[in-house]
Amino acid sequence: MQKILQEAIDNNRHWTAHGAVASYIPELAKENPDALGVCIYNIDNTTLCAGDSHTKFTIQSVSKVVTLICALIDKGKETVFSSVGMEPSADPFNSMVKLETRESHKPLNPFINAGAIVCTSMVQGDNGIEKFNRIHNMIKIMADNPAIDINQSVYRSEKLTGNTNRAIAYYLKGAGLIEKDVEDVLDTYFKLCSIEVTALDVAKMASVVANNGITPWSNERLMSIEICRIVKAIMTTCGLYDSSGQFSVEVGLPSKSGVGGCIMAVAPQNMGIAVIGPALDSHGNSMAGKKVLEYLSNELNLSIF
Ligand code: DON
C-alpha cells in the first residue's frame, strides 16, 4: 500500500507544472507550486502518507464541509435547505449570477461561496466569534488535533481582498437569507477559510465521515448517519464545483476541494484521504491532487460507482 501511495505521488508530480497557485488571495500566491503530498487515515486507525505530506496549508473551501455539518446539527435539514439548495451549480465557486436569476435567490448548494456564507450564518452562536468557535472546535475534534488554528497572514489577506465574497454576502442579506450582521458573518467565513492544517488533519476529518460520523480513534459519535449521508451526497455532486461531474467519472469519491490546494476525499466504510498540491486547475481544484486521487481510486478500486 505504501508503494502505491509513493507511485501516486511520483507518477503524477509532473502535473504540478500544469497548474498555478491561487493569486486572487495575495498571501496564497506564496505557496510552493511544486508541493505534492497525500495522507490516508484508515478507519482501523492506521495511517499512510507520501510526498510532501507535512506541508501546512489553509483549509479554504474544505472548511465548507464542516460548516455544513454544524449547520445541519444545529438547525436540522429542513431549516438548512430552506435557505440553501442541494443542486450542482455548473458555475465557478464564487459566481453570483444565479443568485439573482433564480426565483428564491437561494444559493444553489452549500459548497459554493454563497451557500457556505448562508450556512455560516445558520450555525449556533449569538455572534461571529461564537459561530467561528463552534466550527473551529468541530474541525479540531474531527482532526483529533487541538493545536489547529488560523493562519493570521492569510486571514488578513482574505479580509482585505475578499470583495467578491462581500458582494455575495450583501446580496444575500438583501434577499433575507443571512441571519444577523453581515460583516460579522463574512469575518467568520474569512477566518474559517484561513484555518491552517496538514494532510493528516484533513484525512482524519474525512475518516469520521467515512466511518458514518464516529471518530475511529475514540469511538465518539460526532454526527448522525443521516448527516453523513447528506454531506457525502453533496460532496459527490458539488464538491469540485463545475468539474464535479468529471471528477466523479475519473475518481468517484465524495470529495471537497479548496484553493489552498487540498482535496478531502471520503472512501465510505474504509478511509479518509487528503491530498495537497497548491498548483490549481482553472476551476480552483488541485491539478496534481486530482491525478493522485484518480491513481489511488484505480489502484485500490475505490470508486463508489
Ligand atoms: O472565499 C474564497 O474565495 C476562498 N477563501 C475559498 C474558495 C475556495 O477554496 C474554492 N475552492 N476550490
Image: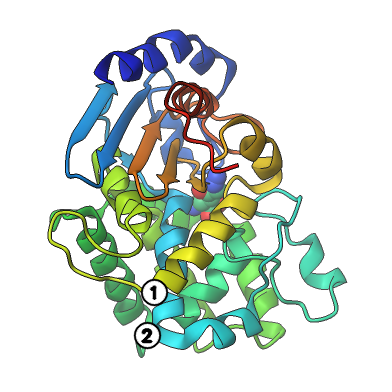
**Residue 136, image x and y in percent?**
28, 65
Q: Secondary structure at mark 1?
A: helix
- Residue 234 in view of the camera: yes
Q: Amino acid at mark 2?
A: Gln
Q: Give 15 or 208, whichever is nearer the viewer.
A: 208
Is residue 303 left or right of 264 when viewed as pictured? Answer: right
The image quadrant that residue 117 belongs to is bottom right
Numbered disc in front, either 1 or 2: 1
In the rendered view of the protein, which quadrant contains the C terminus?
top right
Q: Which residue is mark 2?
A: 124
Q: Is residue 96 left or right of residue 186?
A: right
Front one among 168 and 131: 131
Q: Is residue 37 left or right of residue 240?
A: left
Q: CA distance from mark 1 to mark 2?
A: 8 Å
The location of residue 87, given as percent across then percent down, is: 71, 63
Does dot 2 land on a helix, a strand or a loop? loop
Of 87 and 283, nearer the camera is 87
Q: Is residue 302 above or below residue 94?
A: above
Residue located 35% across and 78% down the image: 131
Query: Which quadrant does the N terminus fall into?
Result: top left
